Amino acid sequence: MMKEDYHMHSCYSFDGKMSLENIIQESIRKGIKEIAVTDHIELAAPDIATGFQVNGAKAEFAKLREKYQDQIIIKRGIELGNVNIDLEQGIALAKEFDGDFILGSVHNLKENEDVGYSNYQQINIKDFYHTYLDAIYQVALNADYDVLAHLTYPMKAIHEQTGWKLDIAEYRKQFESIFEIVVRRGKGIEVNTSGLRVSLQEMLPNEEILRLYKACGGSIITVGSDAHEPQYIGEGIREAMDCLQRLGFTEITTFTNRIPMQHCLGEQS
């Protein structure tokens, strides 16, 4: 089975705790065949937006790719966050990026408040989630990205604090609108396994939403652990790929120079 991890963060991210070489060595040790390191560029907070050391990362990537070329495929990506807040800057940054892969994500609905750390005890969560999906829709429609990351990102914090779980019936039309845009633009979505590591015990997005994506014609799909520490590299990847096969997906996607390539989910590598 093609084993990839297309979402992880090195010390070039503001919250990363691993060197690039640490990521590569741990990925090799765990038998992962292809990785994409997707360090943050977050548009909602200037100190974070400028924290990604593009030139330093690019130079180190080149050296490490050559060093480990016979052991693993290494792709240079970014996670471009919160284009919903500053579309013009987001498009400009994506245009400047000369790597392999761009994850588009929404962490903030307004500056300096990451919804993964918000307090959900005193708000109407159902209404909040409609607003969150509106932001995802705007990114899907207008941003320059390859794959939308963790479409149910707030659910980790929401479930931890309140036990609330998303009812697909309430949000079906919004998800369908997002997926129709994604498919029309030739983009994809991510299966993010970090939700399996918390009380939510679901991938982001969950199986119901992935089934809807497939029904809308979606086929471009990546799988990522969202690892910020070595022990989480590759965690949940096998479960995610088994889930995709169970739902009828036959291919997994990788990217080179931002061009998608499909691989049989069942192929040996």
Image: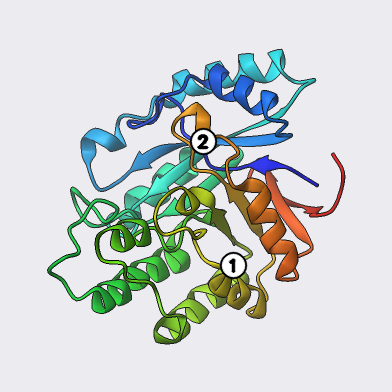
Nearer to us in this view, 53 or 72: 72
Type of amino acid at the residue the image marks with label 1: Arg
The residue under the point 46% across, 23% down is 18
| Side (left or right) of 136 relative to 7 | left
Q: Are circles 2 and 1 on residues that touch, CB within 8 Å?
A: no
Residue 14 horizontal/vertical position (percent): 33, 30
Classify mark 1: residues with Cα within 10 Å, few (<14), some (14-19) or many (20+): few
Relative height, residue 123 to residue 264 (above, below): below
Identify the element where label 2 is drawn: helix
Residue placed under numbered mark 2 in the picture: 232
Name the residue nearer the viewer: 144 or 183.
Answer: 183
Residue shown at the point (49%, 42%) measured from the top left:
226
Mark closer to the chain start, 2 or 1: 1
x, y percent for residue 88: 33, 54
Residue at screen point 75% across, 70% down: 248
Q: Residue at x 47, y 38 (%)?
A: 96
Q: Above or below — where is 128 with respect to 161?
A: below
- Residue 150: image tag: none
Decide: few, some or many residues near mark 2? Use Cα within 10 Å; few <14, some 14-19, many ≥20: some
The quadrant where residue 155 appears: bottom left
Q: Amino acid at mark 2?
A: Tyr
Marks 2 and 1, how far apart in space?
A: 32 Å
Tell me the mark number nearer the camera, choosing from 2 and 1.
Answer: 2
- The C terminus, quarter of image: top right
Q: Is residue 66 left or right of residue 100?
A: right
* Tally of marks: 2
Marking on residue 185 = 1
Q: Position of residue 237 (x, y in %)?
A: 63, 47
